[in-house]
Amino acid sequence: MPHLKLNNATSELVPGRLGALDTVRQWKALAQYAEYNDQKLFYVDSGEGEVVLCLQGFPLASWSWGRVWPRLSHQYRMLSFDYLGSGYSDKPENYPHSVGDIADQVRYLLTTLHLKKVHILAHGSGVTVAQELLARQSEAGTFNPVQIQSVIFLNGGILPGFKSSFMNDLQRMLGNKPKMEGADEVLFGRLLNYLCDENSHLSAQFIHESWFLLNRKSEIPNALGLMSYLADREKNAGRWESVFENRDIPISCIIGQSDPVWGRKMTPALMVKVGREHVARLHEVGNFPHIESPSQVIKRVREILS
């Protein structure tokens, strides 16, 4: 399957001063599809060079990488996809979502594209998928068909044992089916912006298009199946924590400090775990560094991968 190069011929897809893919229409214009267990996986594959696989967090779709995509794809081969049940991928009803299954989707896509080595850039629940892939690589050793060369974590549950009262409250709310059936774009936007720095709230357009992708060919209770990563995190805490003991794979972190859940509260423990020199702290940035401050993330990613 061919991958796309963003050049002058596709410059109309890259508007704005930051060279961002600002709308889902622009993102979908780069669409390619793969079949996984008789279901369609939507993915975007562009640029040339070392492969950087981007794993997003729920409730966002792969389009959430659009603000860093064009500039990074000038230097790297960038790859991301919508997990089954999200974005433009198929959304089968009553699907047994799990972190393990998303990891299977990743490995299937990488194998389909004949990729042998990748770097990973992960955010939110994508962090847990990356940790599952790291654990599998450690367990499989030289028999792993795809080798992870390095991992960059953005905000997320990087330390599975780190407790958050907000996540406990969120789980209780998500378990309230009547409340979730009445959820709307306003509540969705409030939840996202609660996680941002007060000076870098997500735009109404971004919230609207993300809400569209979440609801596309689905209902909110069905989409919430992707929240299974919270239970998986508790079940696999020890196994996923152990990935930090493998010093053969470089792990770096770019953490928005204003994130009330995974920001400055988690940073000291993270520095102990991976080393102070491997944690970049972004001030006045919340849970979504690649959206709130794309230029800083692009700069840090380039520094880490160089």
Image (tube, grey):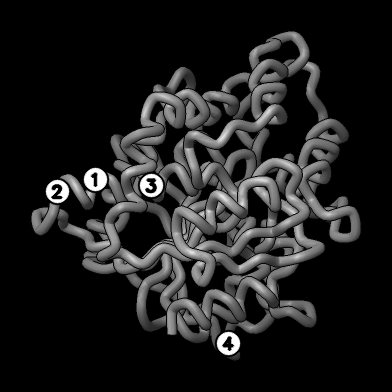
Q: Name the residue under label 3.
A: 131
Residue 95 percent location from the top left of the image = 42, 23
Which residue does the image show at 70% across and 66% down from the upper left? Answer: 282
Identify whether 47 is placed above or below 265: below
Spot the residue most to the bottom.
8
Q: Which amino acid does label 1 sit on?
A: Arg
Dots 2, 4 in contact, CB < 8 A: no
User: Badges 3 and 1: C-beta atoms under 8 Å apart?
Assistant: no
Contact? badges 3 and 4 (CB < 8 Å): no
Query: What number is the disc on residue 136?
Result: 1
Is 17 drawn above or below residue 234 in the view shown? below
> Which residue occupies 79% across, 47% down?
207
Lower position in the chain sequence, tag 1 or tag 4: 4
Q: Residue at x 63, y 39 (%)?
A: 59
Q: Name the residue under label 2.
A: 140
Tell me whether circle 2 and circle 3 mark residues in contact (CB < 8 Å): no
Tell me the amino acid under the disc marked 4. Ala
- Residue 221, quarter of picture: top right
Q: Which of marks 2 and 4 is in front?
A: 2
- Circle nearer the N terminus (2, 4): 4
Label placed on residue 9: 4
- The residues bearing labels 2 and 4 have C-alpha atoms spaced at a distance of 42 Å
Nearest to the eye among marks 3 and 4: give it.
3
Quadrant position of residue 25? bottom right
Mark 1 Cα shell of 10 Å, populated few (<14), some (14-19), many (≥20): some
Mark 2 in CB contact with mark 1 (< 8 angstroms): yes
